[in-house]
Amino acid sequence: IDPSVETLLPLLRSQPPFYLTAHIHEKPYLVTQGDTIRLPFLMHGVSPGDTLRLNRATLLGSRDYTLKAGVPNKELGEKQKWLDERLFVCRATVMGVESEPLRIKEKTKRRQRHVRKIKSKHRYTILRVSEVTVNDVDAVKSSSV
Amino acid sequence: MPLTALKAVAKSQNGIGAHILQCKRLDFHYCDWAGSSRGMLTFLKHTLPRLALSNPSIEITVSPRPHKHPLIKGHYMNGRTRDICVRNLEKEEILAKVEILRLAGGEKLRSVKKPVGSANESVRGIWSGLHGQGIRVGGSVGDLGARARR
C-alpha cells in the first residue's frame, strides 16, 4: 500500500458520505450509497434480491479527498488501472429488469416501395447500490500480513 | 414556540436493506372457446403450479375472460398495472412473458440516457467562488493586449 494512501485514507474515511466510480464491464458509474444504476445491458444469471460486490473502481472520494487509481501504462498495454480492492466495499442489489419503449426502425431502398420494419425492445438490469464504505488501512495491513 | 417535526418525504429504500419484489399480483385470463387460449390452457395446467410455488410473494389469480384473447395482468407496488396479451403463444413463450412481468418494477417504459439515478446531495458540495481557489480576475496587462490583438 502506497505511503500516501496510508496517511490520507484515514482522513478520507473520516468524511462520510463517499462516492465511488465503479466499473462494470469497464464502463464507469459514479455512485453513492442508495443510487440506482440502470445498466445498458441485461445481466444474465442474476435474479431480483441478489447482492453483487463491485470490486473494480477507479475513483474513491469524500468531500475534500479523492483516491485515484494510477494512470495506465500504454506501453505495457494496460487499458485501465484499478484501485486496491481491499480499501473499499461496494455492494449492489439487483432490483429487476426494465424494458425500453418499443422502437421500430424502417429500412428501405431508394425507388423501392417495400419497407421492412425492425422492432427493438431491449431490456436493462437495474441495480441499487446498498453500500459504499471505506475500509480501515491498519485493518487491511494487519490482515494482509 | 411549540416543537414541530420537520416535514420530510419518504425516501425509497428498497434494495438498500431488504429487497421486496415489486410485482405483487399476477392475473391469468383465459377463454375456453377461443383457439388463441390453447397455449394458455396448457400453461395453466402444467406450468403455473410450479411457478406459484417458486414465487410465494406473488398473489396469483386465474379467471375466465370469455370471447377474449388470453391475458396476463401484473399489479405492482406503485399501483400501476401492466398487461401482456399472450394470444397464440405456447406455454414456454407464456412463461417468458411471465418472467418479464415478474422482473419489472411497474414503472412506465421510458428510454433513460443517464445510467445513474440519485436522490443524494453531491458529495463534494456545490462550487463556491469564495472558497477553495476562488475566482481569479484577469492576468497581467500584457495578456489583455495579446488577447485583443488576436
Image: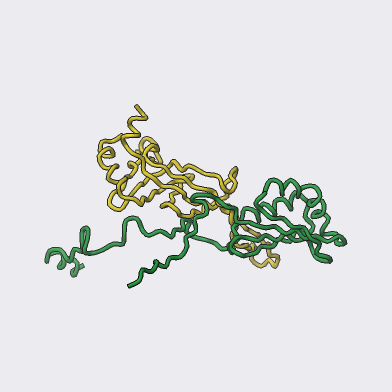
Chain colours: A yellow, B green
Question: Which residue ends up furthest to the top in the rendered image?
Answer: A145
Q: In the shown orientation, is residue A54 left or right of residue B77?
A: left
Question: In the depicted view, which residue is nearer to us: B80 or B1?
Answer: B1
Total residue callouts = 0
Question: Which residue ends up furthest to the right in the rendered image?
Answer: B33
Question: Which residue ends up furthest to the left in the rendered image?
Answer: B141
Q: Residue at x 65, y 64 (%)?
A: B81
> For the C terminus of chain B, which image quadrant?
bottom left
Q: In the shown orientation, is residue B5 left or right of residue A138?
A: right
Q: Residue at x 74, y 51 (%)?
A: B93
**Residue B122 in sight:** yes
Q: Quadrant of residue A50?
A: top right
Q: Position of residue B91 (x, y in %)?
A: 77, 50
Q: Position of residue A12 (x, y in %)?
A: 30, 46
Question: Which residue ends up furthest to the bottom in the rendered image?
Answer: B1
Q: Quadrant of residue B131?
A: bottom left
Question: In the depicted view, which residue is nearer to us: B21 or B36?
Answer: B21
Whether residue B82 is situated above or below residue A65 in the rendered picture: below
Whether residue A83 is situated above or below residue B28 in the rendered picture: above
> For the N terminus of chain B, which image quadrant?
bottom left
Q: In the shown orientation, is residue A109 left or right of residue A86?
A: right
**Residue A30 in sight:** no
Q: Position of residue A5 (x, y in %)?
A: 28, 39
Q: Residue at x 31, y 34 (%)?
A: A138
